[in-house]
Image: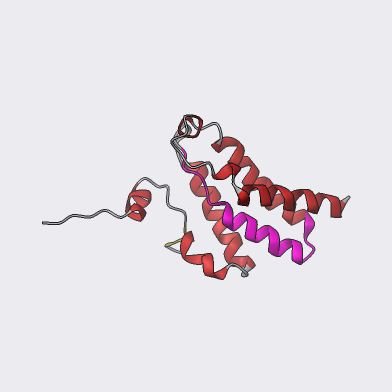
Amino acid sequence: MEWSLEAEDVLRQSRALAEVDGRPTSSFVERKDDLEAMLSCCDAEEATYWRQAPGSRISAAPFFFERAAIILSKRKQYTDVVTICDRWLAIADDYRSQPMVLNGSATQCHLGPRAQAIEKQRARAISKLG
């Protein structure tokens, strides 16, 4: 008898899988220019992140926050850009203090190019508002 457990199943069982309408947020990547889809994914990623136990949180995906910020910026909704970026930054700030991140056994996505792009989007939006 063969038994297999997919990563998605493990994440779902541990309540660490972000979902929109019962589908993993990763299934929305192709809708990257759809603001409503990206915002729904941001909501799901954020809610999933914060409901995980402190000290063992798996990072939210920065992709959706970056895409939402890009779309909002193109629409000149700079206050909303700052808000969506701040939501990601709060997650990133908490994530960097997780023991598995500190000991190097977890992804460093809070330091990666998407995280850096989110910070740049925020700075640009603030300069446009000011």
Magenta portion: prevailing SS class: helix
Place of residue 117 in the rendered image (x, y in percent of width and height, measured from the top left): 68, 52
Residue 20 appears in view: no
Residue 89 appears in view: yes
Going 65% across and 43% down the picture, which residue do you hit? Answer: 89
Q: Is residue 63 left or right of residue 73?
A: left
Residue 100 sits in quarter: top left
| Residue numbers of the magenta segment | 57-78
Q: Is residue 27 above or below residue 61?
A: below
What number of labels is visible?
0
Specify the color scheme: secondary structure
Q: Is residue 95 above or below residue 124?
A: above
Q: Front-most of 50 and 98?
A: 98
Q: Is residue 66 magenta?
A: yes
Going 37% across and 52% down the picture, which residue do you hit? Answer: 12
Q: Is residue 87 left or right of residue 15?
A: right
Extreme residue toward the right, this view: 130
Place of residue 2 in the rendered image (x, y in percent of width and height, measured from the top left): 15, 56
Q: Is residue 54 above or below residue 1?
A: above
Q: Is residue 93 above or below residue 19?
A: above
Going 34% across and 52% down the picture, which residue do you hit? Answer: 7
Place of residue 1 in the rendered image (x, y in percent of width and height, measured from the top left): 10, 56
Place of residue 38 in the rendered image (x, y in percent of width and height, measured from the top left): 59, 62
Q: Front-most of 99 and 91?
A: 99
Extreme residue toward the left, this view: 1
Q: Is residue 60 magenta?
A: yes
